[in-house]
Image: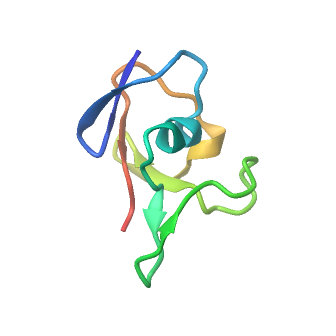
Amino acid sequence: MQIYLNGMPRQVARGTSVAAALLLHAVPCRESVKGTPRAALCGMGICFECRAVINGVAHRRTCQINCLDEMRVETQR
């Protein structure tokens, strides 16, 4: 299926978490206040390192959400 990562169309398999899709396509979830790229750390929603904007909703934990067809994911800065 197709999702959009920062406006770019990307293909992912059904059942893929948003965090896995970001890692698969080498896109960091967000940047720290110092500009360091951040990605999923714990993979179970505790650390909040994997936050991104999903379909316009900010601070979604990408490790807890599976990709849906045509989903739009924007990394946070």
Identify which residue, 44 or 10, lies in the foreground.
10
Residue projecting furthest to the bottom: 34
Q: Find residue 70 and report its image quarter.
A: top left
Residue 42 in view of the camera = yes
Q: Kindly identify the residue that appears in the image at 45 percent across and 62 percent down.
A: 30
Q: How is the image coloured?
A: rainbow
Measuring from the top left, give residue 10's x and y in whole percent.
Answer: 34, 28
Q: Kindly identify the residue that appears in the image at 40 percent across and 19 percent down.
A: 69
Image quadrant for the N terminus?
top left
Q: Find residue 66 and report its image quarter.
A: top right
Image quadrant for the C terminus?
bottom left
Q: Kindly identify the residue that appears in the image at 57 percent across and 55 percent down.
A: 50
Tally the marks.
Answer: 0
Measuring from the top left, give residue 49's x and y in whole percent.
Answer: 61, 62
Q: Is residue 31 above or below residue 72?
A: below
| 27 on left or right of 44 | left
Identify which residue, 7 or 25, lies in the foreground.
25
| 62 on left or right of 41 | left
| 11 on left or right of 45 | left
| 53 on left or right of 8 | right
Identify which residue, 60 or 18, lies in the foreground.
18
Measuring from the top left, give residue 58's x and y in whole percent.
Answer: 43, 55
Measuring from the top left, give residue 4's x and y in whole percent.
Answer: 31, 33
Residue 59 in view of the camera = no
Q: Is residue 29 above or below residue 14?
A: below
Q: Kindly identify the residue that appears in the image at 34 percent across and 46 percent down.
A: 56
